[in-house]
Amino acid sequence: MTSDERDQRVVIVLDSGTTQDSVGQQTPSTATVGTYFAKVMDRSGITLSRAQQMQATSTHLVRMRADSLTRTIEPYTHYFTWRGRRLNPTPGTQPQGYRDLEIEFECEELVSGV
């Protein structure tokens, strides 16, 4: 994949669980780890049915350059934000391309019930 195809900004967030604030309330604790250019592909139609055969909950595919940070992304502890959406990586990350220069994440979109 060329750099021209990675045309969307994706923020990598570390979900650190919860912390207690000054009044004793439990609040979510997150930290922005980095921002990358990536190719985000929506799994719709036929592609979605194929993705669901591989990963039962896959809704998006995120492809970005592999480096020391992106290789440490783990499901359940990291997630991506893209266009105001939260994309959770599912288990089964696959390095792609020459000498593993790219990495792909099958993701599921977290949809709030608000």
Image (cartoon, rainbow, N blue to C red):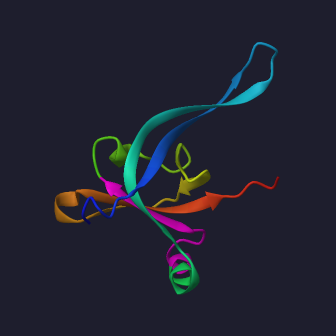
Question: Does any portion of residue 65 appear in the rendered image?
Answer: yes
Q: Residue at x 61, y 54 (%)?
A: 85
Horizontal side of 39 relative to 16 (left or right) equals: left
Q: Residue at x 46, y 49 (%)?
A: 10
Total of numbered circles in the picture? 0
Compared with residue 17, is residue 82 higher up or lower down, i.e. above or below? below
Query: Does the magenta segment cover residue 58?
Result: yes
Q: Residue at x 59, y 72 (%)?
A: 56
Q: Residue at x 52, y 61 (%)?
A: 107
Q: Residue furthest bottom?
A: 46
Give x and y (percent) for residue 34: 42, 38
Question: Does any portion of residue 93 appear in the rendered image?
Answer: no
Horizontal side of 75 relative to 4 (left or right) equals: right
Within the image, what quadrant is residue 6 found in?
A: bottom left
Compared with residue 97, is residue 16 higher up or lower down, i.e. above or below? above
Give x and y (percent) for residue 11: 48, 44
The stretch of residues the image draws in magenta is: 51-65
Give x and y (percent) for residue 32: 50, 34
